[in-house]
Structure formats: C-alpha cells, structure tokens
Image (cartoon, rainbow, N blue to C red):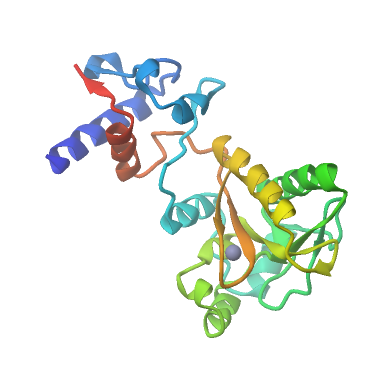
Amino acid sequence: MKNWLGILVLAVTISVNAQSLSVENNFFVNGFNYHYEPDILPAKAAKTIKKEKFLFVKENIKYADHVFEASSFKIPMIADYFQMDELIREGKLVEVPEEGEGYTIQKLTHSRPVLLNEAYDVLKEISDAFYSQTSKKLSISSLTRTEQSQSRLRRVNSNAAKGESAHAYGAAFDISYSQYDGVRGRNYKYEKMVQQILDDLVKDGKIYYIKEVRQPCFHVTVRNPNLNYPADYPVEDILELLMSSDMHVH
Ligand SMILES: [Zn+2]
C-alpha cells in the first residue's frame, strides 16, 4: 500500500514539476484525479498558503529536515576555515557583526560569525523583534562551523554528535536562553518571548528550531525560501502531508 502510494505521489510530483502549475486552490493536477480541498485541511496548514505558493510546514520536524533545508542553499558543506574564507570572498557567506541592534555574539570556540545572507536576515528579524519587546539583546552562542570544527566539538558535546551539521552550511545559529544583554541567568518570561517569535517564524515557513537542553540554546535552521513544495521536497514529505491532511482521492 505504501509503495503503491509512493509511486503515485512520485508521478504526481513529476507532473507538477513538469507543468509548473500555479498552486492556488488546486494542489494537484486535475488530470490525476487528485483534488485539494482547502476546507478539510487543518487550520495550521491552511494558514501557510501565501502568494500562490504552498508553504510546507511539517507536524513532526526531525533533524533530517534541518539538514535538508540547510544543504539546499547551493553551497557545499564547509570543510575548513580556508574554504569558509573563500566563500566569503565569493560573496556566498557574509560576516556577521559582533554586535547588532538586538544581539551580541558570545566568545566563539567552535564556530565563526559568518552566515548565509538568508540566515543573517532571519537572525536580525528575530533579534529585532525581541529587542522591540524587551530592549534587551539576545546572545548568539554559535554560528557557522566547518566539518573540521564540528568533529572537534563532537568530542565535548553530544548534541553535535547527533549530526548538527546544519551549522556547516552557514544556515544555522544558536540563541542562548541563559544570557540576555550579556548578563548570565535564565529568564522564563524572555525565554517564552523568544519561543513565541520562533513559533511564528515556523508557521511562516521561514525556520525550523530545536530547544536544546544540554546546551541552553535554541538551535535555529533557516529554511530555503526558494524551494517549492512539493516539487523540491523528498517524496516522504509529500506522502506525510497526504496522510495527515486527509486529502481525498476521487
Ligand atoms: Zn545548533
């Protein structure tokens, strides 16, 4: 049953891709006898339909989803600092100022203050939103790592062992929740506010995030705004949405 559906979905995907149809109310090509019915979609999914583009937000986001988005930005996994410098020279990565209006970067040990442009924009969006509510600055505890620094970190931090390689594509950064305005200490009100800002960005299809426990930080991976759903996504994701949103095959 699953295999059969997989093949069918793949065929639909290829067809959507080939004809590059606009995805308004018709999610699938009519010729395939699939109908997308907005009224039976869960509210959360319906909210993500914007500008004729179907923004895809999964219910259960796995780390593989972070890596998928991070690696989709057309830069390779950064092997070492030499390659990182080259990507900066080519304009594919930008250096992030140590101090922004709404953030400060902590003393970094396994990463450098460098990001993809798209990720830098999101970092500013988050910190600006937090600053406008609190007049406090967020603390950024990690940005772009290299394959080399990632493997050194693996020896001291088990989060990194799980394959936190979204950092090695310049698409991820960590926001500390145990430091605000350079002062150490947790603040549950601020923590909730950050989480609310992040939740809104998840709904907008802009990021995925994980609240880490071993290291007191929110790990944020920036999603690629140029990916189109479903054409650019793995077949499993399309299948998952079909199953979860109760779409009908007529
Ligand atoms: Zn992280």
Classify 244 as above or below 247.
below
Specify the quadrant of the image occupied by residue 240: top left
Specify the quadrant of the image occupied by residue 83: bottom right
Where residue 22 sits: x, y (%)? 45, 19
For ligand 1, the image quadrant comes to bottom right
As drawn, is 241 to the left or to the right of 84?
left
Identify which residue is drawn at 58% across, 80% down.
153
Specify the quadrant of the image occupied by residue 31: top left
Identify which residue is drawn at 59% across, 43% down.
199
Where residue 178 sits: x, y (%)? 72, 66
Identify which residue is drawn at 61% across, 40% down.
201
Q: Residue furthest front?
A: 188
Question: How many marks do you count on the picture?
Answer: 0
As drawn, is 127 to the left or to the right of 142?
right
Classify 239 as above or below 18.
below
Give the quadrant of the C terminus.
Answer: top left
